[in-house]
Amino acid sequence: MDKTTHEIRIANWRSIIEQCHARPEGQSAKQWLSDNGISEKNYYYWQRKVRKETYALISQKGTPTAESEPVAFAELPFITSKDDGQSFCPDAVMRRGQTVLELSNTISDRLLDRLMEVLSHA
């Protein structure tokens, strides 16, 4: 089997394994596999392959250290609420040039992605 085919199969089975692990509480793996038309023999074969490959990747990379993977921090200023009649208090503020964007923790991922795309061109 060529490398591309192997990677596609591993990715597919990794997804199946994750779905099985996220099965409803109280449902056995055997029942979940049966309900989803997956052979137990194939499932456990690929689970073993995925585990071995994951272990090999972890072993190659080793445990991250402060020297190998530096951590970066960004200071987010704490903004106190203004007494101007507005009830919105942003959780984060982004500035680019004259553009100021005040964000709430409840912003959707899709909207945030779109805003970041627009700001990158500002």
Image: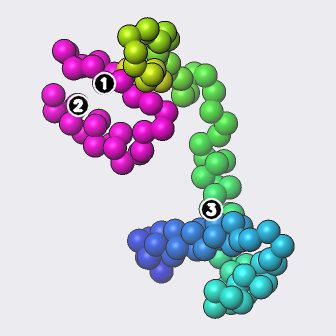
* Residue 50 visible to an observer of this rendering: no
Spatial CA span between label 3 and label 1? 43 Å
Residue labelled with disc 1: 101
Q: How many discs mark residues in the rendered view?
A: 3
Return the disc, 3 or 2, that comes first in the chain's sequence: 3
Which residue is rendered at x = 64% and y = 48% of the image? 58
Which residue is rendered at x = 71% and y = 67% of the image? 21
Residue labelled with disc 2: 119
Q: Which residues are magenta?
A: 94-122
Judge left or right: residue 84 versus residue 32: left
Which image quarter: residue 15?
bottom right
Residue 122 or 93: which is nearer the viewer?
93
Disc 2 marks a residue whose amino acid type is Leu
Task: Give residue 29's position: percent from left, percent from top.
Answer: 78, 78
Compared to 19, does 110 lie above or below?
A: above
Disc 3 marks a residue whose amino acid type is Glu
Compared to 29, does 81 lie above or below?
A: above
Judge left or right: residue 76 versus residue 67: left
Residue 30 or 65: which is nearer the viewer?
30
Spatial CA span between label 3 and label 2? 40 Å
Magenta segment includes 114 = yes
Return the disc, 1 or 2, that comes first in the chain's sequence: 1
Helix, strand or loop at label 3? It is helix
Magenta segment includes 105 = yes
Is the Cβ of the residue at disc 1 closer than 8 Å to that at disc 2? yes
Residue labelled with disc 3: 53
